[in-house]
Amino acid sequence: MTRRPAPLVIGLVAGSHVVNHAYLLLFAPAFPLLREEFGVSLAAVGLALGVVNVVVTAGQLPLGYVSDAYSHTAVLVASLAFGTLGCLLAAVAPTYEWLLAAAAVMGLGVAGHHPAHYPLISATTTDAYRSRAYSVHGFAGAVGLAVPFAAVPAALALGGGWRDAFAAVGLLGGLYAVGTALAVRRIPRSIARAGALAREESRGDPIGGRGLADRLRAVPGRLRGYARTLAGSPLVLVLTALWFVNSVAAWGIRAYAATLLDQGYGLSPGLANTVASAMLVVGAVVLLGGGYLSDRIGPMAMLFAGYGSLVVLAAVAASGLLPAVAAIGVVLFLAATVDLSRPARSTLTDLASERSDVGKNFALITLGVSGGGAVAPPAFGYIIEATSVGVAFGAVAATAGLALALSVWVGRMQGGQADI
């Protein structure tokens, strides 16, 4: 299969990342409004966001299988369609139970975006541009996470409410879904069904001419085959562990950077939160630069640079000895050290994957990311309550050290190949 740059595909995938990440955090900025609307506790409102994430996590591997075995573009369009439906259902929810059901539908949609995005990027990029393509994808995701936090305040400022904000996000997402459904017709079959065609070529396993019942009966055997593939390719499992550890460090920073500046350095809560928000913007910009550098000097160098910098900066910030101005500067770049290596991690996962398993492998990686997001906030919160915020950021530095060690392991496993 010819592998070539495809701006259309990368653009569609990046736009889809914006939309899906907007759905992923749709409820977060509206928590107080939802609590008042439905007369439930804050924990119950948080459960709605939890439902989204549980469904996203549960759907990763099954949708990764569907993407690889049948069509990446079909999963791409279906992801946008179900996410949009869930968002619009949430906008008109008459009861709390309806809201939870809408969250489940939205989660099913969001679950499909990574299993579709990464194989499409993999199938359309050359070695010279792969990391930059992944950096554009990551930057778009960062923009998407910010969308709900802009949409809800904007709706309130215009005299509307959370329903108007949700409806606006859903309508924009729906328009994008329709546009994507039309645009994917221009994507060659060699890209749209890259995983299925690779399976057909390498295993003599034709994908056409089978009934649905035959395909369903084949699923257990194919999943066992995938498990054997993973056992024979431990690099993917080590990369999954690296993504998990990275996610733990990243969520510790994102969740508690403002707390560090407030409790550790005496900044006002308002200023501390402003710096923490600016930190995420800096990280998103650095992510783009990380893709460029990864293409120029190789992804392994970016892993070492990112995690080495995080070990140093997190340890210095944890000391509590910096002047307040210096602490602000350090915190601004904490998230950037993690984002610097994200395109490199994506590239390494791509290069370690068989073409017929890219969707499943990135679904597995996403499970690692989700696991880190589930573990880190309560774990670091407990450390802060039991000891201090400085100790918690010392733990972040230790976590970064573990990521650095795993990076060394990755480098040894891939054998120092020049293209990796």
Image (tube, rainbow, N blue to C red):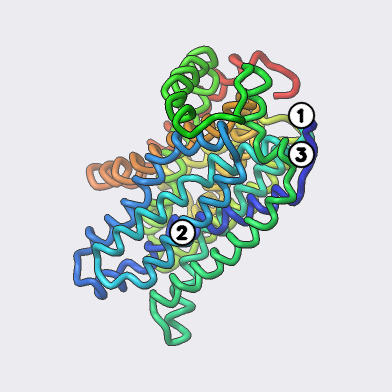
Q: Position of residue 372 (x, y in %)?
A: 40, 38
Q: Of residues 274 and 123, which is closer to you in this image?
A: 123
**Residue count near mark 2 (Cα–Cα under 10 Å), binned few <14, some 14–19, many ≥20:** many
Q: Which quadrant holds residue 132?
A: top right
In the image, residue 148 above or below residue 251? below
Closer to the camera: disc 1 or disc 3? 1
Q: Of residues 213 and 44, which is closer to you in this image?
A: 213
Q: Which quadrant holds residue 353?
A: top right
Q: Position of residue 56 (x, y in %)?
A: 41, 45
Q: Of residues 160 and 167, which is closer to you in this image?
A: 167
Earlier in the chain: of badge 3 and badge 2, it is: 2
Q: Amino acid at mark 2?
A: Tyr
User: Which residue matches tag 2?
Assistant: 23
Q: Which quadrant holds residue 268?
A: bottom left
Distance of mark 1 from mark 2, alpha carbons? 34 Å
Closer to the camera: disc 3 or disc 2? 2
Query: Visible in this render: residue 401?
Result: no
Q: Amino acid at mark 1?
A: Met
Residue 1, disc: 1
**Residue count near mark 1 (Cα–Cα under 10 Å), binned few <14, some 14–19, many ≥20:** few
Residue that appears at 68% across and 16% down:
416
Indicate left or right for 105 with 281 as reference. Answer: left
Residue that appears at 49% across and 60% down:
22
Q: Secondary structure at mark 3?
A: loop
